[in-house]
Structure formats: C-alpha cells, structure tokens
Image (cartoon, rainbow, N blue to C red):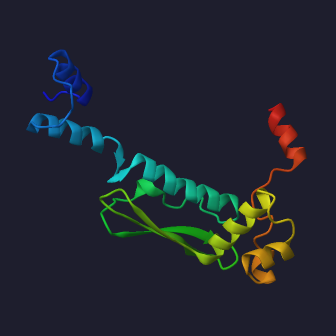
Amino acid sequence: MSKSTLALINEIKTENQDFEFYPTTTDMLQCIEKNIKSREVHGLSNSATNFINDICTVAFNIGYDTEGMQRAEDFKWESNKKKLFMFKNHSSGETEELFEVKAFKNGNLHIKLRPSFICKLNVEFGRLKGWLKTKEEASSELGMGIEEVNGAFKSNFQIPTSSALRLIAA
C-alpha cells in the first residue's frame, strides 16, 4: 500500500534526513504524482478550474446567460486542446461562443474572450471603480464607439433595494 506524501516526509524527518527533500525513489515519485493528480479535475488543476468558472460567473453577472452551460469540470482537458465556453444569446435564440481556453502541461492557460465580453468587462470595471462616470466618458477613455458602450454601461446584475430587503428578511 502506498504512503501519503505527508507520511513519507514524516518518515524522512524521523530519520533526520529532511535537510532537503528530493524525491529519489519510485515510491516517493508515485506518491507525489498521486497527490498532484488528486488536486486536478479531469486534467486541470483546481485553481485553473475555479478561475475558468469564475470567468463564467462574471460573464453571467454582466449579462451573458451561462446558466446550464458547460463549466471547466465538464471537459476532459488535454494540453494545447481548445475548449469552448458558450452562452445563450436571447436576442438571436442561439447558443454562441463566449470564450475559448487552451490549457498546457506547465499550468498556463491561454484564454481568448469574445470582444463584446471584453468591452462589457472593461466598461463595468471602470464604472464600478469610479474611473468612468458616464457612457460618454467610457467611450472616450476606452476608445470605443458610444453604441458599443451603451450596451455595456451598467450591465452588471443588480438587486433592487426592495428585493434586497426581502432577501434579508428571509
């Protein structure tokens, strides 16, 4: 039966051999590999999975309906293989691409976002930080057309005060 990484390290410490830890035996390497893989979801680290899912949540909060769409843990991840994340476009009735992700063995993620998503993200971030006060200011500062900014300004999900009070009471 294989030992856990912690059990191996404690054994090494007990034998006063913990000056520097270099995995040198097959048992050590297999133990560490198992430990690393236990932190993965279908070939993707937990932190990368959470990061990608956070992008989906942010997209939902600024008007992209990602509810019921695939999340990072729904894919089998392979290095340098593109995965598409979609949203429901209620204007067209179609499911469309929101962003794509390629994951690599070294832990890097390459993410390509839909241009309208980037626009909304930048406009809303600037507005929420207090850097952009009006649509006209956002258009000027970000070098975007006013039409483009119109759909992005105040596009984040907001709970009206009347509903918020009911949520608190519940």
Quarter of the figure with the C terminus: top right
Q: Position of residue 149 (x, y in %)?
A: 77, 76
Left or right: residue 152 compared with residue 51: right
- Residue at 56% from the left image edge and 53% from the top image edge: 54
- Most extreme residue toward the front is 19
Q: 80 or 131, which is in the foreground?
A: 131
**Eyeballing the image, is 6 above or below 57?**
above
**Eyeballing the image, is 132 above or below 34?**
below
Q: Is residue 89 visible?
A: no
Q: Is residue 112 visible?
A: yes
- Most extreme residue toward the left is 25
**Eyeballing the image, is 129 above or below 6?**
below
- Residue at 80% from the left image edge and 38% from the top image edge: 167
Q: 159 or 16, which is in the foreground?
A: 16
Q: 59 or 48, which is in the foreground?
A: 48
Res 61 → quadrant: bottom right
Q: Position of residue 41 (x, y in %)?
A: 37, 49
Q: Position of residue 122 (x, y in %)?
A: 69, 67
Res 87 → quadrant: bottom right
Q: How many marks?
A: 0
Left or right: residue 37 compared with residue 126: left
Q: 69 or 138, which is in the foreground?
A: 138
Quarter of the figure with the N terminus: top left
- Residue at 28% from the left image edge and 44% from the top image edge: 37
Q: Position of residue 96 (x, y in %)?
A: 56, 75
- Most extreme residue toward the top is 14
